[in-house]
Image: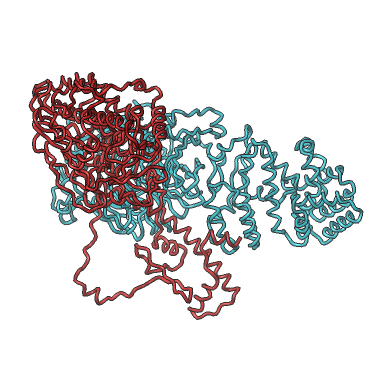
Chain colours: A red, B cyan
Amino acid sequence: MADREERRFAEVSRESVRLMAEGAGVELGDDVAALLAEDVCYRLREATQSSSQFMRHAKRRKLTVEDFNRALRWSNVEAICGYGAQDALPFRSVKEGELFFVEDRDVNLVELALATNIPKGCAETMVRVNVSYLDGKGNLEPQGTVPTAVQSLSDDLLKYYQQITRAILGEDPHLMKVALLDLQSNSKIAALLPYFVYVISGVKSVSHDLEQLNRLMHMVKSLVQNPYLYLGSYVRSLVSSVMYCILEPLAASINPLNDHWTLRDYAALLLSHIFWTHGDLVSGLYHQILLSLQKVLSDPVRPLCSHYGAVVGLHALGWKAVERVLFPHLPAYWANLQAVLDDYSVSNAQVKADGHKVYGAILVAVERLLKMKALSLSQSAEGQSGAHPGSVVGAVSYRVNSPGLSPPPEPLSEAALGIASHLQVGGAGCHWEEWTPVPLPAMYCELYSFFGDSLAVRFSTGTGFGTHSPCTPSQLGDSRKEPPGPASNLDTTRKMPQLTANLNISPRQDGSPRTDPPPPTTRGAPRSAGLSREVFPKARFTSPQTTPPAFSFLIGGRQMGQRCQGRRPFQTMFATTPPVSAIPPRTYAHKLPVIGRVGKPVRRWTCSHYSLHLPL
Amino acid sequence: MIALTGKNQSYVLVLYGLCFPLIHVAHAQFILKMAAVQGGMGDADIKTDIKTEPSADGFGNNNANDGRVLSASPGSSSSTGSNKQTAAVTPEDQQTLLAVLQFLKKNKLSESVEILRREPGSDTNSDQPDVSVVLSAYSQQGDPTLYKVYYRDLKKFIETVLDCHRAELSQVFYPLFVHMYLELVYNNHESEAKAFFEKFSGDQECYYEEDLRILSGLTKKEHMRGNETLLDFRTSKFVLRISRDSYQLLKRHLQERQNNQIWNIIQEHLYIDIFDGMPRSKSQIDAMSGSLAGEAKREANKTKVYYGLLKEPEIELPLDDEDEEAENEEGKPKKKKPKKDSVGSKSKKQDPNAPSQNRIPLPELKDSDKLDKIMYMKEATKRIRLGPDNLPSVCFYTFLNAYQGLTAVDLTDDSSLIAGGFADSTVRVWSVTPKKLRKVKSAADLNLIDKESDDVLERIMDEKTASESKIMYGHSGPVYGISFSPDRNYLLSSSEDGTVRLWSLLTFTCLVAYKGHNYPVWDTQFSPYGYYFVSGGHDRVARLWATDHYQPLRIFSGHLADITCTRFHPNSNYVATGSSDRTIRLWDVLSGNCVRIFTGHKGPIHSLAFSPNGKFLASGATDGRVLLWDIGHGLMVGELKGHTDTIYSLRFSRDGEILASGSMDNTVRLWDAMKAFDDLETDDFTAATGHIHLQDNSQELLLGTYTTKSTPVIHLHFTRRNLLLAAGVSQL
């Protein structure tokens, strides 16, 4: 009973009472002290109770000394002076005496009086009005809005949450970097994950603000990269936020000066990154993503920027996705695109420029597709003759390992099973169940009919494929080190250097996320120790590659294909820096993000340290 | 007499008990009983009661139904009964009982011994201690240890009754618990009181937690003296509403058990409002309970309330000078225009529920008031019609650098001025429009101006004093309540220093300090027609004042704890007060009587709002719930759950379609008031009994939740065009 009482209230012990009495020069008997102690406790409780109403009426949450003094004054007790400080007073103890006291430093009045730096008065109290919600919709400044549930978090976490969100969404780019870095590596923020996900889901309300969208995407990346976070089902929410940035006709896209293309590219890469690293957390995610991308692509009502998003999204998901979704849709889509590109009216200029973006994106995607498909064929052929079973993945399973990587140690059967199960999960009712792979020559022919000579990849269509492969794995492996490698490799077979795209950072080639190894090279460093995701039996590889990968996307020359329209060269380049090294952000040659538009200044965020570095 | 019959019944029980298994004991018991009777009271009318009671109370029925209880009753009634009559306890009784026990043992009548032992506590597990408790009860006067037994006994009984009665009877627990505890404390049985508290405090409803905390701190008689809350609890009667059937059940049980201790408490400290009909369900009871003194008696809410609005005086809308009016929009008119005084044409029909126009004397309209009315009507035509599909825009007035602590905010009806009361005793007024605040010129300067000129009202203002805000000093404590007069010439502020001050907004000086409360004044508000104002504070009374009287015109007394908020009814004939005793009372300004008591909140009430049509009242409390009340029927008609912290502000939109609530949890929530009130079925039965069944539809009624940036919302206001204004201090 006594214990319970103690838990309910703080108590003043009789020893304390006796000590205080001694301090005042009075000797107290034991029973008197006990009685007094009890009474003191009661009076304290009473005063606290009545002081709380002063707090409530002052509409505060924090009980102040002032409140307590008021309660004392109204019960005819002298107020206690000298404790009016706003901050908490440090309460210290002396070891020997079991005494606690409030530290009370001497104030040097002379120094204070002669001080020259007289503090200025506080700023004037004033009232400022702002429109918070128009027509009941919160359309202004969503940053800083804290979901009410956050209040239930511990103070530290809450503070962390507020600081981080404020830093990331705030004005200071340096602060943002620090915050993102911390978000990437902090091991104690699991409890905050839902709130961060909630904040990120706010993309829909800031679609007018590219800057904020970018910041949110960076936040996604940091969260995804944090090795201590188990994203679980939040992956779905993150993916949908990212997909929003990829696919939606953002309000920011209305103004052609806004470089939403880069955002879409970035988000697409992010999507593939999430998918490859965390795709196994949600079953059927791959097919859901593909389905929604396909839906957008096949919807002619959607603006071109949405289509662009779908294409880059597919491209980022790997050549398999391109083969499955983009390639079959191409004939239908081509008609629409061509109509746009052939319209030379002034009013169409903007749309046409967008059309070129889409065109470029498709081109890049299909070139990758062709290259990888050829590669896979050659590899499977090699594998059949070769001796290591590990490196071989049958063409039947469409599983191709990237040539730069050493083969996964998993048994072949498991890999095949992984794919099969994956297909089953998403396959129910999906119409691409009946999809049959188009043989490479046929595909090439078809693509050639669309793009003509602007296709950078060349095959001699006449010869049989079984005997000839355009490039060997080793060649590719070498070429990887110098970005324009493959292009130069193929120069021999190419007749006209035209629109070249070289995307040697494209995401992992294909395979099921469950069995495919996570990115081992650069990501190996930040996610090295104590990885929470290590619990998943995944193979890790060391890569022969040591230099930071660079991703260049170069489209140059004049396009002489079916369209035959002159195109100014443009180039998009991403260089990725290793996340841990403190290399200052490179200044990028990032020009002409929009075809036909010159000298658009580089958006600040693209220069930041945080452009996505893709694992290789 | 009721108490008497209660005791008598136990004797009846004894007599019945004789026929039951304890044949051997019977004789001894009878002797024992008679001794008790003789010691206790005169036995002349007992005999007659013995004959009449059983049939009168349907006792025989119960007898048949509940054999177990009955068979167990003789012993128990003997012990409890005798112990209760403390005066009657004699050594003889004790000896008799001991003798009986010994006799039984000697004769190896172990079964009877068991039965006899089992009785006192009806606790079969620990026979031995219980017997000793019973025995010691004879020696000690009013053994406090028995309180536990009584309470447990009752608890057991209530737990075993039919479900439909259990909820109703469970209401008895809390007041009984408190009173028994207080009695123990009062009689200096500290350790027993603590033990009693420990044992049963966990059983109480969670919404009494706050009271229990106060209670648990109180363990000495001396402490009770100063604790007003608990004194009130002791002196006032806790009101329970119980259906007749349930009440009969309880009464019968207590009488059977001779549980006079509990019965006495029920008689003395509880008011049981018995109604005929179906017992209420747990949710119905929970909706209405929670206040410091139980529910309101049904009669308390029977008085007729004239909740209708007063007829507006008809003012011709001058259509010709539209532009000129627009110029005068903010503030005083440049020219006084001779307005046609269109008095009292009876074209509009009088609302049957409205009080007569002169029920209380109201100030006559001045010219400037009429101008304002015209402005109001013009604005009203531009008003946005709100609804679930058309939510209002929200503007937030953030007080910056309010390091001293903002404690109260008010906006004028036309939203042109905003005033803040601060913890540093200051009152500050800001102009929200571009028009600056100006003082009137000094007396010397006023002599110089041409008093015949048309724009004299403009000329009296001193341009040199124009500023965006004015500070008014005068209080000596935090300003907890603030209110503009409807004509925007005055401002009221109530403070911790016990005064209410009236400030002039022409000179920005204090005109009057109304003293009377002597304790902190938590809230004050002007009547919608001006002149009158109401204030309420820590002294538990609300006062009605007129600005030209230094003493209150009415004192509304009845709350059991601080009055935390006060509101005038739109027709100015009634005043609503919310209190820390978790009730809301409606007072008639004319008679000073309390005409409505609303219970149901589980925490101190901090905000009130009348619907514009005067029919409904909304209240918000620290429990984060908004309750809606039908004033005419005196019923709770809705419960809006959603907020997670104290609701400090409530406001209906101008047409009453939407209720906005602002809370400490940094949100403003909008509720579909139309739907909440339309869905009511106020048939005669619910109106008569007051047992409304609330459906839990908060989520349907919630139209929107708007979060602020870490800023508690302490004031809400709808402009005349239905733009929602909110105010608060950022906590960042």
Does the image show residue B607? yes
Q: Pick the residue in front: A289 or B46.
A: A289
| The N terminus of chain A lies in quadrant | bottom right
Front-most of B652 and A204? A204
B488 left or right of A13? left
Residue A429 x, y percent position in the rendering? 39, 22
From the viewer's side, name the closer residue of B379 and B292.
Answer: B292
Can you say which quadrant of the picture contains the C terminus of chain A? top left
Query: In the image, is residue A246 above or below residue A31?
Result: above
Residue A279 visible in image: no
Q: Position of residue A504 (x, y in %)?
A: 21, 37
Taking B511 as reference, is A77 above or below it? below
Residue B295: give x, y in percent of width and height: 55, 43
Q: Position of residue B79 (x, y in %)?
A: 78, 53
Q: Residue at x 23, y 57 (%)?
A: A123
Quadrant assignment, res A505? top left
Question: Seen in the image, is B427 located left or right of residue B48?
Answer: left
Choose between B525 and A499: the one closer to the eye. A499
Specify whether B321 is left or right of B289: left
Report which quarter residue A481 is drawn in. Answer: top left
Task: Find residue A539 and report its image quarter.
Answer: top left
